Image (cartoon, grey):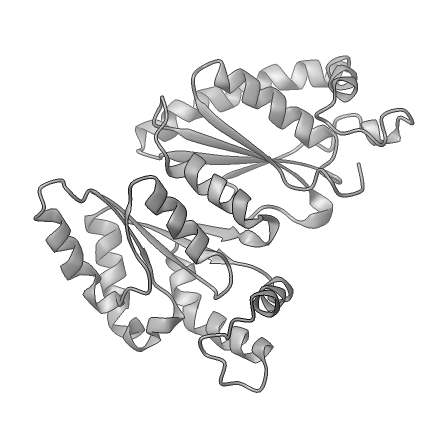
């Protein structure tokens, strides 16, 4: 039985995440009391396979059960190979979302929402520390977050699902990355006048990259390394792999590498998705 626990900070996208899981066949429960989790999973097992994929949102709304729930979550991880996903965003993003939706923070008893978020982070920190994956959702629109869930946990031709992310170091490393590759050593099209305003998805930039001797040496080595690792991760039972490539601004070099790698992996029948996080921002 596949068990996913979705937790995180209020306003970080837990509802979007679990609704996407529901769309791909997970039995989903929001605001589930931790203290009841193990008993509920035992009941699911008794259905003899009728319920074989479950997802639960556990967050600060059930904080009264947190102390009793620590051992329960550890047991669920061990016995059911449960996966804990923790969603978060910077305070500035969360405050804007609360204002846009006019929602009230669940523990809004402090003098302001910043204090409420600080208290929530303190309460939730132990779950974050034992999570299998921490995702910063500030870089996703609701649609992109939903697509990320569908691509990561949906069915595919091979078990391993590979998410490729291009990003700019100027804007920070993606927290959800399993592996990060720095490609800032490659010649930068940003400093070529006719390529400066283009992106790594254009034919002109792709041609420029492929014409460079460093790139022509690097990419085959990169591809061989990643295709060597994928079966090893599959053997360990990992169902998805998120690989991030960063250049200075996330506009030219990293998108070009990501798209080329996605094309090659797709030819090997891997379910591969791409996210170009910073491609519409300025910089090289």
Query: Which quadrant of the structure image shows residue 223?
Result: top right
Q: Is residue 124 left or right of residue 237?
A: right
Judge by depth and name the residue closer to the eye, 164 or 236: 164
Q: Position of residue 74 (x, y in %)?
A: 26, 58
| Quadrant including the N terminus | top left
- In the displayed structure, 85 sits above or below 162; it is below
- In the displayed structure, 210 sits above or below 131; it is above
In the image, farthest residue toward the right: 193
| Quadrant including the C terminus | top right
Q: Position of residue 72 (x, y in %)?
A: 22, 63
Q: Is residue 201 visible?
A: yes
Q: Is residue 249 left or right of residue 76?
A: right
Q: Residue at x 62, y 62 (%)?
A: 93
Q: Is residue 224 visible?
A: no
- In the displayed structure, 78 sits above or below 31; it is above
Q: Residue at x 48, y 56 (%)?
A: 13
Q: Position of residue 216 (x, y in %)?
A: 69, 13
Q: Is residue 191 left or right of residue 56?
A: right
Judge by depth and name the residue closer to the eye, 257 or 32: 32
Q: Residue at x 45, y 14 (%)?
A: 268
């Amino acid at each position: 039985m596949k068990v996913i626990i979705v937790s995180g900070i209020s306003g970080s996208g837990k509802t979007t995440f679990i609704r996407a899981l529901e769309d791909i066949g997970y039995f989903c429960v929001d605001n589930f009391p931790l203290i009841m989790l193990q008993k509920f999973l035992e009941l699911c097992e008794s259905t003899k396979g009728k319920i074989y994929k479950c997802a639960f949102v556990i967050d600060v709304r059930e904080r009264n059960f947190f102390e009793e729930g620590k051992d329960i979550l550890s047991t669920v991880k061990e016995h059911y190979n449960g996966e804990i996903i923790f969603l978060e965003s910077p305070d500035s993003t969360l405050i804007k979302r609360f204002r846009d939706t006019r929602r009230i923070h669940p523990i809004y008893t402090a003098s302001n929402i910043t204090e409420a978020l600080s208290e929530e982070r303190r309460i939730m920190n132990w779950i974050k520390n034992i999570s299998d994956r921490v995702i910063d959702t500030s870089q996703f629109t609701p649609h992109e977050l939903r697509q990320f869930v569908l691509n990561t946990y949906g069915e595919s031709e091979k078990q391993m699902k590979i998410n490729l992310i291009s990003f700019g170091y100027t804007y920070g490393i993606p927290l959800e990355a399993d592996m990060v590759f720095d490609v800032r050593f490659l010649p930068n099209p940003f400093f070529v006048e006719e390529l400066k305003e283009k992106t790594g998805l254009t034919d002109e930039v792709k041609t420029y990259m492929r014409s460079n001797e460093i790139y022509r040496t690097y990419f085959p080595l990169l591809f061989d390394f990643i295709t060597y690792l994928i079966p090893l991760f599959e053997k360990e039972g990992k169902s998805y792999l998120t690989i991030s490539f960063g250049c200075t601004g996330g506009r030219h070099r990293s998108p070009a590498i990501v798209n080329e790698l996605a094309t090659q992996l797709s030819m090997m029948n891997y379910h591969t998705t791409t996210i170009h996080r910073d491609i519409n921002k300025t910089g090289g």
